[in-house]
Structure formats: structure tokens, C-alpha cells
Amino acid sequence: MIGWDEVRGVAMAMPGATEAVSFGVPHWRVRNTGFVWERPLRRADLAFLGIDEQPWPVLGARVEDEAVKFALVEDDPDVFFTTPHFDGWSAILVRLDTISRRRLDEVVADAWLAVAPKRLAEEYLRTFGD
């Protein structure tokens, strides 16, 4: 299972990344805009999911748009999910107990690209490709 130290390492490897604490949990940002964060499930989330308590760690991640969010959920519902709290918002929830390291790297990079300043994103893509 992917742990928070591993998430931190992947997130902090992105250009210009910083770590902050928001609502008591880690939140990784680029130029003060969050791209991934620890997302404890709230009471309404648990009720929506039909569970009594959070059984696995959850990462929140920005995505390009809601179409990407819904495609991820449809493509791999064992890893990706959403709740009504995120309706209308370009973010996905990720189960850290089921995601592979390769996929985590992709999710973090895509989340970073979704919010990074244009010039910084272009530089990253020139260096690392799509």
C-alpha cells in the first residue's frame, strides 16, 4: 500500500511544489494552488459510500475537468471515486490501498499540470514529455 511519505516524495518532486497543512492534513501546492492532499472522509461521504468508517487512506487530486474525473471513476472504480461534495469540482478521490506506484506518479503529475502556471507546466512537459 502507498503511504503518505511516498505521496509526499512524489508531490514534492514536482517543480515548485510546497507542502502546507490545511484543515489539519497535508496539502501539496504549486504557487499556492493545491494539487494533491490527504482527504479524510467526512460523515456525508461515509453515508454516501454506505460505510461506517474510513477503511483506507484517501488522496484528493485535481484533474483537468469533470470529464476526466468521471472517466477515471468509470475506468478504474477500485482506485478512483468521488462523492457529492466534489460535484461540479475538478477533483478525484484516490484509494491509496489500491493504487500502484506508477499510477500514483501519473495522478500526481496530472494534478500538478492541472493547476501549475502555464510557463512552468510547459517547461516540465519539454523536460519530461506528456
Image (cartoon, grey):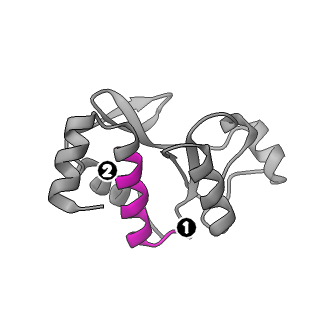
In depth, the one of 8 and 70 nearer the eye is 70
Residue at 68% over, 49% down: 82
Q: Position of residue 119 (x, y in %)?
A: 20, 36
18 relative to 111, above or below? above
Residue for badge 2: 11
Q: Main secondary structure of the magenta part?
A: helix
Mark 2 vs mark 1, foreground winner is: 2
What residue range appears in magenta?
A: 98-112
- In-image side of 7 versus 39 (left or right): left
Q: Earlier in the sequence, mark 2 or mark 1?
A: 2
Disc 1 target residue: 97
In the picture shown, does residue 32 fall above or below 72?
above
Q: Nearer the viewer, residue 51 or 62?
A: 62
Give the residue displayed 30% in from the left and 61% down from the top.
130
- Number of other residues with Cα within 10 Å of mark 1, as a class: few under 14, some 14 to 19, many 20 or more: some
Residue 17 rendering spot, x and y as whole percentages: 25, 40
Q: Position of residue 96 (x, y in %)?
A: 52, 62
Spatial distance from mark 2 to mark 1, Cα to Cα? 18 Å
Residue 45 highlighted magenta (yes or no): no
In the rendered structure, the answer to whether residue 116 lies left or right of residue 23 reads left
Q: Position of residue 53 (x, y in %)?
A: 74, 51
The residue type indicated by label 1 comes to: Asp
